[in-house]
Image: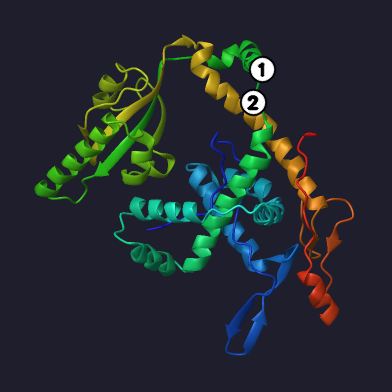
Amino acid sequence: MKIWKVFPVQLSAGIIVLAALTLVVPPQVHAQSSKGTVIEEIVARVNNDAITLSDVQKADQALHEEIAHDCQGCSPEKMEEIYKDKQKDLLRDLIDQALLVERAKDMGISVETDVIKRLDEIRKQNNMGSMEELEKAVESQGLGWEDFKSQIRNTLLTQEVIRREVGSHISIPTDAVKKYYDEHQKDFIRPEQIVLSEIFLSTEGKSPEEMSSVEKKAEDLRNRVVKGEDFNEIAKHFSEGSTAKDGGELGTFEHGQLSKQLEDIVFKMDKGQMTDVIQTKTGFEVLKVEAHFEAGLQPLDKVENEIMNRIYGQKMQPTMREYLGQLREQSYVMVKPGYTDSAAVPGASVIQEVAPTPDAADAKKAKKKITKPKVNGQ
């Protein structure tokens, strides 16, 4: 069972802002062997941190896994095309993450409480009784427990910096939403659609007695939502389906895309309503209607959030790159010859293969202080 993969960092609005992320290790990385100590190849330095060849290889592997996950059913040619397009920015993205993690440290951001919460979510999603069980499962897959936690920590630090330093500077006026709607009305002419989320509990391999217990648990979870708890948070922590990590988000469906059993129920419901516990061939589930769109041109109020996400996405990428460019200009970034940093600023330094000296060793410890950069002149 695959416990955790390194996939793109996403903001709350669902906008992908960075590609492959991996662990950034300290400048001196030693691997013990029968022949002595081997110093791992350093590909890039970011202030006092280093990106090693193994970091690049891990990110490359994660990129392949991400494409396979997101492009299921694609031809090998299509997957290779996507890979080549994203691979050229692989080192850039590792440097970006290192810059953002350093920025988080400069800002005094701590995410330790969130790291513990995230670990507990992963434990629950994988139906494990204790954190020790999760640790053993992680290590059985060849990843050190501390490395695993560091990956989560760095991702959370990155997200928080982006939220504070970039996302907070992006505003979307109401008239911009209305203007976009008026200019793209053809995008909002749709057949009847319904957006669903689920809480799913599996009954595969269960005895009749165990199935009864699963059904009771599903009823209990539904009752917790009825009493005021958040459906998507319940799904995230207790649902056993593949959608749990996304808060139970199933997607958007038209007539004919669901089983008749489910379609006959959910297409009669309004936004915010929740089904009773439904038994399927593989388990028990509760469905929530997140949105219900009638056929034809959708009114502005029903697609407003979607439009805001689109505009936000259009503004995020250039604003993000501008911000990262400012961080680079105020930082010490060096790349080894033979490797490509697709966002390198003009006149960027390269790593020279020279023997270390005491002075050089001291210089490595020096770290340039980063002042808070401006975003879009603010």
Measuring 71% from the left and 56% from the top, which residue is drawn there? 95
Quadrant in the picture for the N terminus: bottom left
Residue 40 position within the rendered picture, expressed as x and y whole percent measured from the top left: 67, 75
The relative height of residue 312 versus residue 352 in the rendered view (above or below) is above
Q: Who's the residue at 44% across and 15% down the image?
A: 191
User: Can you tell which mark lies on residue 85?
Assistant: none
Are circles 1 and 2 on residues that touch, CB within 8 Å? yes
Q: In the visual, does 226 lie left or right of 35?
A: left
Whichever of labels 1 and 2 marks the residue nearer the N terminus, that label is: 1
The residue type indicated by label 1 comes to Ala
Q: Quadrant of the C terminus?
A: top right
Residue 128 position by quadrant: bottom left
Quarter occupied by residue 267: top left
Q: Which residue is mark 1?
A: 176
Residue toward you, 38 or 367: 367
Mark 1 closeness class: few <14, some 14–19, many ≥20 residues within 10 Å: few
On the image, the x and y values in percent for residue 109 come to 60, 52
Is any atom of residue 143 visible in this view?
Answer: no
Q: Which residue is mark 2?
A: 311
Residue with the most extreme left position: 209
Q: Is residue 85 left or right of residue 72?
A: right
Secondary element at tag 1: helix
- Where is residue 294? Give x, y as percent: 41, 12
Name of the residue lying farthest toward the right: 347
Identity, as a three-letter code, of the amino acid under mark 2? Ile
Which of the 4 quarters of the picture holds residue 178?
top right
Label 2 residue SS: helix
Q: Is residue 335 above or below residue 353?
A: above
Colour pattern of the rendering: rainbow
Q: Is residue 257 left or right of residue 157?
A: left
Q: How far is the residue under mark 1 from the one under mark 2? A: 9 Å
Total marks placed: 2
